[in-house]
Structures are given as C-alpha cells and as structure tokens.
Image: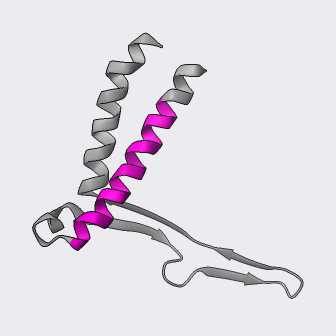
Amino acid sequence: MKKTLVFLLFFLMGIFLGTVLTEIASQVSFLSFLTWGKTIGFGDPNPLVLDLSVIKLTLGFTFQINLAILLCLIGSLIFYAKVGKGI
C-alpha cells in the first residue's frame, strides 16, 4: 500500500513538473519544441450539456500529452525505480 502511494506521488509530480515546464518552454523560443504534443478528449471547447430544467449536467474530458510532460514523467518513474527499492 505504501509503495503504491509513493508511486502515485512520483507519477503525479512528473505530470505536474511537465506541465510547469511546458508553460515555461512556451515563453522561450528555443525551447518551444518541448510543447509539441497532442490533446485528445471530448467536450473541448464545447462541453456536452444535459439540461433537465431542475439540474444541468456538463460533461467534458481532455487529455493532453506533450514532450515536456513525457520527459518529466519518464524521469520521475526512473527516479521512483531507484528510490522505491528502499520502501
């Protein structure tokens, strides 16, 4: 259980760091290649709306992957492999 939680922490931190790196790289011209990627999902930019008069339900899902997120995710999983042995 503890190992699973640590794995999820490393996984989420890799995604978070990749997202931050994407934002930084989009502002720097020679790092713009790190922002190359693909977005898949539904409901973007127009979410699916179900209006039942009493309640309104809005659905949408978007998954974005780019080079910066992929590199940070791989790095965090390699780091987990080294650190996770001791857990």
Report the residue that reaches farthest toward the left: 30
76 vs 23: above or below: above
Q: Position of residue 74 (x, y in %)?
A: 29, 39
Q: Is residue 56 left or right of residue 63?
A: right
Image point (47%, 44%), residue name: 12
Report the residue that reaches farthest toward the right: 54
Q: Is residue 47 left or right of residue 30?
A: right
State the predominant SS element of the stretch in magenta: helix
Residue 48 in the magenta stretch? The answer is no
Image point (13%, 72%), residue name: 29
Q: Position of residue 82 (x, y in %)?
A: 32, 20
Q: In which quadrant will I find the N terminus?
A: top right
Image point (40%, 49%), residue name: 15
What residue range appears in magenta? 7-27
- Colour approach in the figure: one colour
Find residue 5 and report its image quarter. top right
Which residue is nearer to you in this view: 65 or 32?
A: 32
Image point (33%, 43%), residue name: 73
Residue 13 in the magenta stretch? The answer is yes
Report the residue that reaches farthest toward the top: 86
Number of numbered discs overlaid on the protein picture: 0
Find residue 84 and report its image quarter. top left
